[in-house]
Image: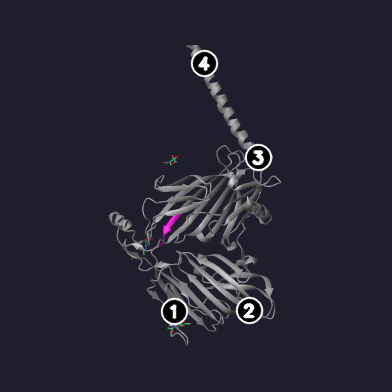
């Protein structure tokens, strides 16, 4: 019950769906250059290669050097990074309760080889004032397998390119960069000259490389580096996830369906897949980069799950459901190796009471996860997520709040979805998002809407009417038959 009182309180924050909602960008002149208004006093850049996407954390103590108060801090990206960066969230490291700061893509010269996101500080800082920003972001399609092809039982290695100095449009007085791998096996990494204490960087301790501390570097300083790490796990990439959430007041049900197009972006097989060898590998539980299973924790109370691929129902799945969990374990028909694709669909139902509440004014509030999907130790990245929420017929005044980073939202719209037995068609909210990772699964989507009294009656009335029609037809048919029989 408790989450719902919060949900109701949140209704005031909901935005009305519009074609432009979510696309947060700011248009600036083509010759735009970020003004030199800040310096970075101290910066720690943590690059995590522990998942099949890259997570970067930049903690930076910034200080205003301009004469006027400043509230705009710019982050630079290459055009290639712009296409793959996702989930940017910025907080005050010393005041996490203050929430996330607004982050907008900057639209200016599209041909510029540096593009920007703009961070908006909640209160402008005066000259000499400081603030500690905690910036989190993700890169999808971040790695290249090296070697590009491997044998079925060989270890997989991935390469990641980065800069030893954190990219910044401001001078940085002091900084270090940490790279965290998933295993201690880091066969190759770029070495750079060190300082008085260490002749070269990085220092390698276990699965972590540390570059720096470095002294003052000018704005835009870069030092390209590459690291090659062992990664004996699937490099799973969801090109598209289409998630449908269908609300039925009349049936008291919420139906979920998710359609996935999954690719393995790891090393391809050198030779053809060998099933006998695979059985042996599986028997010895040898580490493998092949994808064998998805574990999908659903909301408690989920029922009637199904798992379908291009061939049909996949029976090799298990569903464990009780008061504490509803875990769907999916085993694809074959292990998925590098370069392979696997499209599939899963779906399930749940009692509407688990997600839907009526407001005191007669409206409704629906609270569902924005997306769910597998929870894998190696992670899961989503290039494109399309969530469609199909509301009861005649629903109006639809507002929503998706608790995912604003820069991940692409667009939203309201349409009419017509199905069999619908008279006016159902109201459908579509939200498109991009570059998400499984760190954001279970972030909520809250929707408020109203249904006019007549609209709630229409569906039962319609079904009643069609029963009547069948009854009338049946009655008429029997009359005819009676007519025939009397003629004989
Ligand atoms: C490198 O520097 C760190 C301190 O920054 C020190 O703990 C470490 O022992 C040094 N390593 C070498 C090989 O000098
Ligand atoms: C798949 O399984 C469901 C329920 O287990 C069943 O209703 C449906 O007919 C099956 N579909 C196919 C194509 O076998
Ligand atoms: C791996 O396989 C995929 C799909 O067949 C192909 O598109 C890709 O080019 C292959 N990569 C290499 C390095 O051979």
Tell me the residue that label 2 is attached to. 63
- The x, y position of residue 462, in whole percent, is 61, 34
Residue with the mark numbered 1: 203
**Magenta span:** 261-265
Q: Secondary structure at mark 4?
A: helix
- Kindly check if marks 2 and 4 are in contact, taking CB atoms under 8 A apart as contact: no
Of tags 3 and 1, which is closer to the observer? 1
Q: Residues within 10 Å of mark 1 (few under 14, many from 20)?
A: some
Contact flag, marks 2 and 3 (Cβ < 8 Å): no
Q: Which residue is mark 3?
A: 455
Label 4 vs 3, first from the N-terminus: 3
Residue depicted at 38% across the width and 60% down the height: 339
Q: Marks 2 and 4, Cα distance to the nearest angstrom?
A: 94 Å
> Residue 61 versus residue 76: which sits nearer the camera?
61
Q: Tell me which numbered mark, 3 or 1, is placed earlier along the sequence.
A: 1
Callout 3 touching callout 1 (CB < 8 Å)? no
Circle nearer the viewer, 1 or 4: 1
Q: Is 437 situated left or right of 148 in this image?
A: right
Say whether residue 8 is left or right of residue 245. Answer: right
**Residue 9: image location, x then y, percent:** 68, 54
| Element at label 3 | helix
Q: Residue at x 60, y 58 (%)?
A: 403
Q: 481 or 345, which is in the foreground? A: 345
Count of residue discs:
4
The residue beneath circle 4 is 482
- Callout 1: helix, strand or loop? strand
Closer to the eye: label 2 or 4: 2
């Amino acid at each position: 019950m408790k989450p719902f009182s919060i949900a109701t309180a949140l209704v005031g924050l909901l935005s009305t769906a519009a074609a432009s909602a979510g696309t947060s960008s700011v248009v600036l002149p083509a010759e735009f250059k970020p003004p030199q208004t800040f310096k970075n006093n101290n910066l720690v850049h943590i690059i995590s290669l522990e998942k099949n996407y890259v997570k970067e954390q930049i903690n930076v103590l910034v200080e205003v050097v301009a004469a006027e108060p400043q509230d705009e801090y710019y982050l630079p990206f290459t055009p290639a990074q712009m296409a793959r960066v996702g989930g940017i969230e910025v907080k005050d490291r010393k005041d996490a309760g203050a929430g996330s700061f607004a982050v907008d893509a900057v639209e200016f010269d599209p041909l510029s080889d540096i593009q920007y996101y703009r961070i908006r500080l909640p209160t402008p800082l005066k000259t000499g004032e400081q603030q500690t920003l905690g910036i989190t972001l993700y890169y999808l399609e971040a790695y290249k397998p090296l070697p590009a092809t491997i044998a079925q039982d060989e270890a997989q290695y991935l390469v990641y390119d980065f800069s030893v100095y954190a990219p910044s449009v401001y001078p940085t007085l002091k900084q270090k960069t940490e790279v965290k791998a998933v295993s201690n096996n880091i066969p190759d990494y770029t070495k750079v000259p060190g300082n008085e204490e260490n002749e070269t960087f990085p220092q390698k301790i276990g699965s972590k490389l540390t570059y720096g501390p470095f002294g003052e570097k000018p704005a835009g300083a870069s030092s390209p580096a590459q690291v090659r790490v062992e990664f004996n796990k699937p490099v799973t990439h969801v090109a598209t996830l289409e998630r449908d959430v269908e609300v039925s007041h009349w049936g008291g049900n919420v139906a979920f369906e998710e359609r996935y197009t999954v690719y393995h972006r790891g090393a391809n097989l050198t030779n053809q897949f060998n099933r006998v060898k695979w059985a042996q590998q599986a028997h010895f539980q040898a580490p493998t980069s092949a994808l064998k299973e998805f574990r999908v924790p659903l909301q408690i109370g989920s029922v009637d799950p199904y798992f379908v691929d291009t061939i049909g129902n996949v029976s090799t799945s298990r569903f464990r459901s009780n008061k504490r969990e509803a875990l769907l374990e999916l085993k694809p028909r074959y292990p998925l190796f590098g370069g392979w694709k696997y499209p599939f669909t899963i779906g399930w139902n749940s009692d509407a009471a688990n997600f839907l509440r009526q407001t005191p004014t007669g409206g409704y509030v629906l609270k569902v996860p924005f997306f769910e999907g597998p929870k894998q130790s190696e992670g899961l990245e989503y290039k494109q997520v399309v969530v469609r929420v199909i509301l009861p017929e005649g629903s109006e005044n639809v507002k929503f709040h998706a608790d995912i980073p604003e820069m991940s939202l692409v667009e939203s719209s309201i349409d009419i979805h017509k199905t069999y037995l619908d008279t006016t068609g159902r109201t459908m909210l579509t939200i498109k998002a991009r570059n998400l990772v499984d760190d954001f699964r279970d972030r909520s989507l809250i929707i408020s809407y109203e249904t006019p009294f007549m609209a709630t009656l229409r569906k039962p009335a319609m079904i009643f009417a069609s029963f009547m029609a069948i009854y009338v037809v049946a009655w008429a048919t029997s009359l005819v038959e009676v007519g025939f029989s009397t003629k004989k």
